[in-house]
Amino acid sequence: MNIKLLLVPVLLVLSGGLFAQKSVNVDNLRFTYQERQLPQRPLNPPFFYYAVKIDLPTSMRMLVTEESLYDKVFIAGQRSTFEPRENDVLISVKMSPVIIVRNTIKERVTEKKERDGTVKKEYFYKMEIVYNFEANAVVTTRGKVLNRYTMCSRTRNFTFNTIEYKTGKEASDFWRNNREVLIEQFTRECADEAVIYLSNTLNGSFGFPVRGQTTLIKTINDRNHPENDALRANSNEIKARMEALDGLTPLTEDDMSDIIEYFKDIPARYSDAASKADAQLRYVAYFNLCRIYMFVNQPEQVKEWSDLLLTNGIDKKDAQGLQKDADALIKRFDRLGIRTAQFDTNDYFTD
């Protein structure tokens, strides 16, 4: 009889331990999204028309045409024109032909020891061709030089090696018989590389390219917790909506209202200050709310939720990192007065 009475409190303790979970497994959920980048050196106004002029010497026009290079000079988010006006930006490109610096036969020798102790030597020959190229550009507007670029100079040499042949004569004959074809190949490669380099540089300085960014949100992975399925579903939905961003269409708070309400409700439902599991759920909620408000272009809200993340105490470094992200977003908005990282530049042209 006494044994039965003693079992009751023991069972109560055990059953309470089963339902009072000490902690939950918190995981990162990483994803990539598209975002509109801002220029490092925006013009005034930052959105403009530009024209490209390419000057090739006669010897190069036989190998590559200006038309094949025009489309490779591209400034993302800006508008190109073939009839530049005074206020437009003019990109003037000048190239000089490939010059062969030297062509040299290179010899390679291998040695193989035979069974009788003799050493057999085998000779291989290839032609090494060293050449250089020159390409420059100047960017102007309203008669003023904005910048000068050297895409390639004569101080930089390129090296081409033929395949190996059994004799030096074969290597020499290959160069003699294919010299014009190879120079045409070198010219096209150098010209393409020059305008691609120029385009990348212009995009960094004056363009609004759309580029992929990687970030993360939080989720849980704990089947024993009653919130597991709902929280994972909402975190996965954040990921899906962010991955759909294309750099053109801004996301609004209304677009995320259902998920925002879900995560705002978690701290109210899991408010036990003594429970580590509750604190971890609040951490996930605060962190994800910070990320959501970053994406809906409300950095001030990010700072408010990151303050709660900081006082929650699970990971103060995350809170501090999110506050820095919010400060960086505010500075970005202040640069051009565009309060989103998702926009169509066509909306900002005045004509």
Image (cartoon, rainbow, N blue to C red):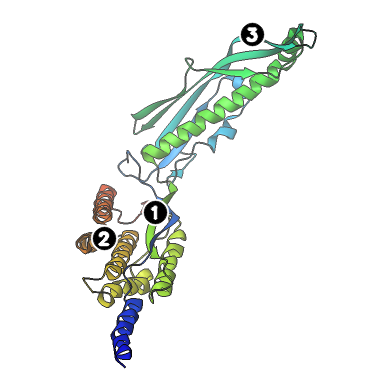
Q: Is residue 300 above or below residue 130?
A: below
Instruction: Check disc 3 and report its element: helix, strand or loop.
Output: strand
Which three-letter amino acid code belongs to the residue tagged 1? Thr
For label 3, the crowd category at 10 Å Cα-Cα, with few meaning under 14, some 14 to 19 and many 20 or more, is few
Instruction: Check disc 1 and report its element: helix, strand or loop.
Output: strand
Between 74 and 197, the one lying in front of the other is 197
Q: Earlier in the sequence, mark 3 or mark 2?
A: 3
Which three-letter amino acid code belongs to the residue tagged 3? Thr
Could you tell whether 305 is left or right of 17 in the image?
A: left
- Evaluate whether residue 268 shows in this view: yes
> Residue 248: which quarter of the image?
bottom left
Q: Is residue 165 above or below residue 151?
A: above
Q: Is residue 122 above or below residue 227?
A: above
Between 193 and 314, the one lying in front of the other is 314
Q: Position of residue 37 (x, y in %)?
A: 38, 47
- Evaluate whether residue 85 shows in this view: no
Q: Which residue is mark 3?
A: 104
Q: Position of residue 324 (x, y in %)?
A: 25, 50
- The mark closer to the camera, 3 or 1, is 1
Which three-letter amino acid code belongs to the residue tagged 2? Ile
- The mark closer to the camera, 1 or 2, is 2
Between 343 and 58, the one lying in front of the other is 343
- Report the Cα–Cα distance between label 3 and label 2: 67 Å
Could you tell whether 107 is left or right of 285 in the image?
A: right
Q: Position of residue 41 (x, y in %)?
A: 32, 38
> Residue 24: which quarter of the image?
bottom left
- Seen at 37% across and 69% down, the residue is 256
**Quadrant containing the N terminus in the rendered view:** bottom left
Q: Which residue is mark 1?
A: 215
Q: Which residue is mark 2?
A: 314
